[in-house]
Amino acid sequence: MAGGVGFVSILTLARADRNRYLSAPHRGIAFDHAQLTPSATNTKRNRRSPRERTRLVAARVDENLEHDLQQCDVKLTGVVANTLRRDMLRGTIPALVFVGPWWFAMRNFPEEQAPAAAARRLSSQSRRVRAVACTRCALHAGFLQRKHRSSRLIFGVRTGNIRATRRTLRSAAQRERELKAQLKAQLKAAIQPGWSAAESAELYGIKSWGAGYFDLSDDGTVAVSVPFNGARARVSLLDIIAGMQQRGLQMPVLLRIENILDAQISLLNESFGRAMRSLSYGGTYRGVFPIKVNQQCQVIEEIARFGARYGHGLEAGSKAELLIALASMEPDSGYIVCNGYKDTEFITLGLQALKLGYRVFFVLETPTELPIVLETSRTLGIRPMLGVRVKLASRVSGAWNESSGDRSIFGLTTSQIVELIDSLKQHDMLDCLQLMHYHLGSQIPNIRDIRSGVLEAARYYVDLKQEGAALDYLDLGGGLAVDYDGSQTSYDYSKNYSLDEYCLDVVEAIMSVLDPQGIQHPVIITESGRATVAYSSVLLFNILDVTRFEPGQVPAPSPKGEHELIGNLRDSLKSLGPRNLQEGYNDAVYYRGEIRDLFKRGQIRLRELSLAENIFLEIVSAIVRRLQDVKRTPPGLDGLEQSLSDIYYGNFSVFQSLPDVWAIDQIFPIMPVHRHTEAPSRQAIIADITCDSDGKIDQFIGSRGIRKTLPVHPLIDGEPYYLGVFLVGAYQETLGDLHNLMGDTNVVSVRINEDSTFDFVREMSGDSIADVLSYVEYQPQQLLEQFRKTAEQAVRDGRVSVAERQAVLEAFAASLRGYTYYED
Ligand code: PLP
């Protein structure tokens, strides 16, 4: 069964095979017969004999395609190789000799006659006649399956004049070429029998951004893996989801993995420990977790519990956060660093905590804080542990670079620092100034910026020491970045350094400035928030629905005629070729615009507009298909593929669960949680269920940078499809808002055990509708009462029965208790 371009093969998909493929849409095969071989579906034979109603797909194929098809169990039950050429040769001489019978045959098959019937009649003529007919009319008509039901099929019959036949053959050939490309692309993209979890891992870059915590298992599900005494324990996310369902927890769910939190705290402390040992650093490392990065009780409690072994403390930026810190930590378990504006109440509480044994630093952010501190400490008779935030000149790159440079909001300028020293000296309190702090911004992607910040800070440290301050602590603030896209570059959502490099650079830079001055090495504090918690949370949600942008059926022009502009669109489609893609697109956009204007003015009907939109989509689809063979995409056609991508509707709110996606276009890794042994054959953007056009995600991590669509699997009827948004543990939860009154999601904390089992350590139900209504000052009970009155009035008016009133009131009450997200 030779292939090669120029051969014509006819595949009959036996009904069983066809059904298998049609009922396996996840394979992404669209054997839309009407689309592929319009003439064949409509043959009388096909309509008449359901037993033999096989789908016929005619296409020029090559060996690769045939191989692909065979790989997919598609039976090639009929092949006519080289039919056209062979029949041409065979047919020419008999055509001359047997022109009589041919003429007779033609006259006996009127135009309207069904091709199959015509072919049957023709088959009763001599073979030669049939050969001629085949040659002349091949693709103009339907197919004839021969009586003995061999696999061989021949082309059916009926023709007009020779010129018409030539035209038909030409357009059939063009159509055939398109079909071939289409079929091949579909098969390549969709079936890929060799598709494996490893290919999916590559596609979604999970190994790059997963930091060893996330990976794909051979069964095609995303797995979480955590370290245990040199080995790793591994759990499938799908198993965790099954556990949630058994416990009645609906999607969306925010999943927290406690072990990851612990592992990150260990990594940070141990990396600094290693760096200090390797460079013979004289001081120690003490981390503090900034509560603002994730204030959730479960998170802070775990950090305080696990961090105690490293003396890992907390950073508080407000009175409320100071309360959390004091309640969560034991007095001697770590430091509490108080940043932000502080009033007398804040300072009073902090000073009293000092008496209980807590080590609480007040970092002076502005000159106005000092008089309040001095006054309160005098009143209470407690000497404070003071810090000063310096405003460094060093600027950093990245999305949060506003915290650095001269115009940064917080921190004292050089002259304010000098005034502070003089003032403390005056009050005989310079020995209270023990800590120097700076913060250049969150998510600093470039190690050079980090290093130059440390060098500058160390210079301040030396001079403050020399001014007589009793400094012992150098607090570098936050900024340790997370590699969200896994590219290991200085791109905003990545980082071009490892944790070990970060620690070594910090320690080495401090030593390089302090050692020549003979200054004792300080305790290094960092306020790493993002890097501590980002990995520990995953947002899981299900896909509810999909919108596809595919052309519907485009009927042939009506015999009564159609609007000229629609005809123009049809012409644009017909004349589309590799050299005029841009022109064809421009024409199509123009004609569609004109047609839309006509519709607005009431000059054409909805059906005509719909037809025009369909032809337009057909043109765009054809262009996108052809672009795959073009070396360079014309600039005007960039992003065209995206315009045809699906919209997958996810059961979540961007505003509530991923506020930074909406606010600052942050990129998070997103991928399906399962089905990774199937090729993700669709391209989609993700929309949430708020009715806001901003509620979408249309930037994703690709293997070669940011991509506009996410590869996903086609939905399977009745089967859930889950996506996960990873690395969402930092900043997202509290920044989220109640847009469209979508409340907090359900939250589940799991702990993975050494034997790769897991426990649900905590579950928290998300907001009910009554909860969110009360946040915006409604009283749910009062709402129910108001509604009850309306329903009662309807009973009085005879519009509903008492039973109906009861049913509607129960529905109202049940909704108040319900989850704010889509419930099954
Ligand atoms: N410290 C201060 C003063 C901050 O403002 C921030 C946040 O921007 C952090 C620490 C935490 O930064 P990151 O999450 O980048 O570690």
Image (spheres, rainbow, N blue to C red):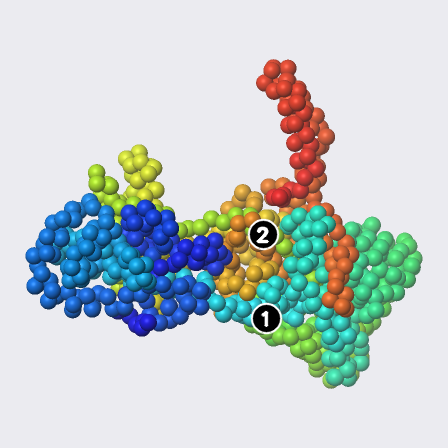
| Helix, strand or loop for disc 1 | helix
Residue 726 visible: yes
Residue at mark 2: 720
Left or right, 189 with respect to 397, comes to left
Query: Residue 347, labelled with which disc?
Result: none
Q: Which amino acid does label 2 sit on?
A: Pro
Q: Where is residue 16 in the image (x, y as percent from the top left)?
A: 44, 56
Residue at mark 1: 208
Asked if 167 appears above or below 520 in the picture, the reply is above
Asked if 577 appears above or below 52 in the picture, the reply is below
In-front residue for pair 378/120:
120
Q: Quadrant of the C terminus?
A: top right
| Helix, strand or loop for disc 2 | loop
Label 2 beta carbon less than 8 Å to ligand 1:
no
Q: Where is residue 732 in the image (x, y as percent from the top left)?
A: 65, 55
In-front residue for pair 67/413:
67
Q: Position of residue 177 (x, y in %)?
A: 29, 63
